[in-house]
Amino acid sequence: MPDREDLIKNANIDKIAKEGQKIYDKIKIKYEPEHNGEFLAIEIESEQVYLGKTSAEAVEIARLKHKDKVFYVVKIGYTAADTLAGLFKEWN
């Protein structure tokens, strides 16, 4: 199994972002506003979504089913820019 770094290097990030956002736009009504501030990890090929209190938790849950995938992660109820800013703070 490839390690996470290799998965990310070999992933088509633009495709994941575009497809992930399309999927989220279709399903966000199921999650907003009651889950605002939580995170979804979306596996774009199966369109399966995994809910977590943090981005790390959502991805950890998703990886149980899809060990070799890179996920689109979105903070529910926030714009993509807000999500990226929040994730940057978590990583640093």
Image: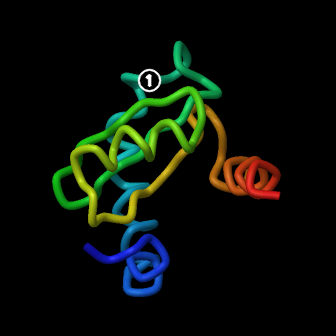
Q: In the rendered view, tell whether residue 83 sits above or below residue 5.
A: above
Q: Would you say 7 lies left or right of 84 here?
A: left
Residue identifier under label 1? 31
Residue reaching furthest top?
34
Q: Residues within 10 Å of mark 1 (few under 14, many from 20)?
A: some
Q: Would you say 80 lies left or right of 30 here?
A: right
Q: In the rendered view, tell whether residue 49 sits above or below residue 32.
A: below
Image quarter (top left, top right, bottom left or bottom right) of the C terminus: bottom right
Residue reaching furthest left?
46
Residue reaching furthest bottom?
10
Q: Secondary structure at mark 1?
A: loop
Residue found 64% across the figure and 27% down from its top? 37
Residue in front for this viewpoint, 39 or 80:
39
User: Percent position (x, y) of residue 67?
Assistant: 27, 58
Residue in front for this viewpoint, 9 or 32:
9
Image quarter (top left, top right, bottom left or bottom right) of the N terminus: bottom left
User: Percent position (x, y) of residue 57?
Assistant: 51, 36
Residue found 44% across the figure and 46% down from its top? 59
Q: In the rendered view, tell whether residue 6 sits above or below residue 91.
A: below
Residue found 41% across the figure and 44% down from its top? 25
User: Percent position (x, y) of residue 77?
Assistant: 60, 32
Three-letter code for the amino acid on which mark 1 is drawn: Tyr
Q: State which quadrant residue 31 falls in.
A: top left
Q: Would you say 21 lies left or right of 44 here?
A: right
Q: State which quadrant residue 78 falls in.
A: top right
